[in-house]
Amino acid sequence: MYRKLIGKTTAEKVEKLTRHLTSVKSYNGTIGEREKAEDILSIIQSFPYFKEHPEEVWIQDIPNDSLERKNVWARLTGNSARTVLFHSHIDTVETDDFGSLQSIAHDSDALQSFFSSYDGDHRVQEDAASGDWLFGRGSLDMQSGVAVHLVNLLAFSEQKEQLDGTMLFLFNPDEESEHAGMLAALHELQKMKEKGCQYVAAINNDFIAPMYDGDHTKYIYTGAAGKVLPCFYIYGREAHVGDVLTSIDPTLVGAEINRKINQNLDLVEELEGEYVLPPACLFFKEDKHHYNVQTAVSAGLYFNYFVFERTAKDVIEKLRSITISTVEELKNQSEFRYGTFRKSHGFPPSDWDWDIEVCTFDELAQNLKKKGMNVEETLDEVQATFSEKDRRETSFELVNTLQQLDPEKKPRIILFFAPPFLPHNFLNEQNEFGSEIKRKLLKRLDQVSRETGETFVTKRFFPYLSDGSFLSLHESEEEVNVLKKNMPRMDTVYPLPVDLIRSLNIPSINIGVYGRDGHKWTERVYKPYTFHVLPGLIRNFALDLVTKN
């Protein structure tokens, strides 16, 4: 690959690599992630510096990974221990959304030709006709980001004078799902720290996009949003449909909980100037496996819930409050409906009740232990049978097991968390390098703005999901314990190295590639900024960071 880059400008190199990487499929959860890592390794190994120093580029296998995915590392050691980590994820989502165009989903030229005469969206058509945009699955999210880091790696390696500090590059899989690449990378980062690496900051270049039509601002994020996955296991009271008004229908309860939480702007954190999204329901299902005329016994749902300054403790307390008020409203509604129906048919009063207990996973576990139940042994047995299952499915089965242990089988809603959990990461100006990073970032952005005419705005939190979340942890031990106690078997189902993350404490800055429609079939990256402006901005900011001034 190196030979194909000789004599080209920086922008031409980035475009060449972006086109190449976009053409190589690396769908999340497939062997393509491994193949993309091997491709990136071969690209780095073709650079003259790494031919002379082969020990400075290496592969890290992801432990216990059925797909044998890998992280790719490359290092340029400088005069000091001050180290900047550059990271990009190499996986993409799949191409089902391309429909009949799947055969050209990775062919940037064919897509540009198609969209140039596409009448379905005038913005896409105009962008294709301009020649300023490069299309294709992964072009924006985030093969162009990988390309920018590779070109900067090459540029640093070609400098004649030794760098003031160390430049460390990581290309990792599995950002689009459960972040196995970055979680494995934490252990490699710790090994290097123990050998003297002093991490100043990490630079991610995950994609950014306009916030609204006509928005040309380039948003730079000095941290990343966190995420929890709050779950609801709803155990009701079944009934024949001929006696439905005596039931406690978990689908009705779940629907009302969903209505009160899903996309509810009242649950958004109020952070001035930040782009904060409300919770979104990602799963809602009852337990029935085949058709019959019995109402469902149980149901489950869970939500994507972004956290910025709030913690898991804050979230579960808020959702418990909503749930308690919901079941009270439904109890009154059921009593009214049954009473109205009974009276209309002249039936005598009955002693049916519609009480639903609301508790957390930990509260139920402790209650059952007090009743003499062997909770831990039972959970061990269930977990063993679900070892190859989806982690969220395993979590629900563990919770269901607790409910079945209760001899009373009372209707209840159990609140808990399932994987993944992403810590919120923000630039703490009390951190060893926090104020220095902010000062140098603003100075560099001001200079680039004057040179290029670009408008930059810094924000505290990258508003989507990012591997950078795992580089720092700000939650207290008490707040993390709430999560640990209420994520069933977290130590084995989702063994997050909390202490390691807290120990590394690397500020993560996102200076992203720019484009539109990430995760859509119209995905495209804007070449004038991403290929011409961004590489120099990132490269010079990194040099600023390793220089003591």
Image (tube, helix red, strand yellow):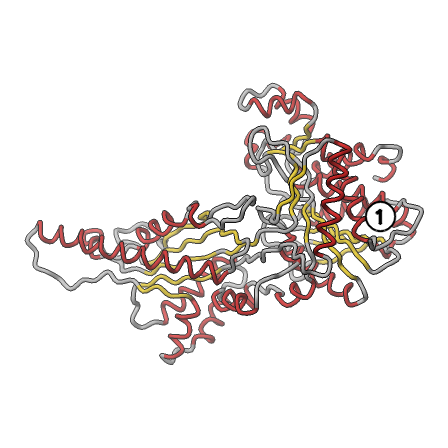
- With 336 as the anchor, is 415 left or right in this view? right
**Image quarter (top left, top right, bottom left or bottom right) of the N terminus:** top right
Q: Which amino acid type corresponds to the residue marked 1 in the rendered image?
A: Gln
Name the residue that disc number 1 marks: 45
Residue 188: % across, % down: 74, 62
| Residue occupying the point 31% across, 58% down | 297
For disc 1, the neighbor class at 10 Å (few under 14, some 14 to 19, many from 20) is: many
Q: Residue furthest right?
A: 160
The answer to whether any part of residue 29 appears in the image is no
- Of residues 425 and 103, the one nearer the viewer is 425
Q: 196 and 416: which one is in front?
A: 196
Which residue is nearer to you in this view: 34 or 274?
274
Which residue lies at the image location 9% right of the left edge and 52% below the top edge?
343
Count of numbered labels shown in the rendering: 1
Residue 406: % across, % down: 34, 71
Q: Is mark 1 on a helix, strand or loop?
A: helix
Residues 322 and 145: in front is 322
Q: Farthest residue to the left: give it.
A: 346
- Kindly tell me whether residue 265 is visible in this rendering: yes
Task: Give left or right: position of 38 versus 397.
Answer: right
Question: For this view, does 474 lie left or right of residue 168?
Answer: left
In the image, residue 39 lies at what x, y percent?
76, 45
515 versus 353 height, above or below? above
Which image quadrant is residue 274 in? top right
Q: Where 330 falls versus 153 (above or below)? A: below
Q: Position of residue 103 (x, y in %)?
A: 62, 31
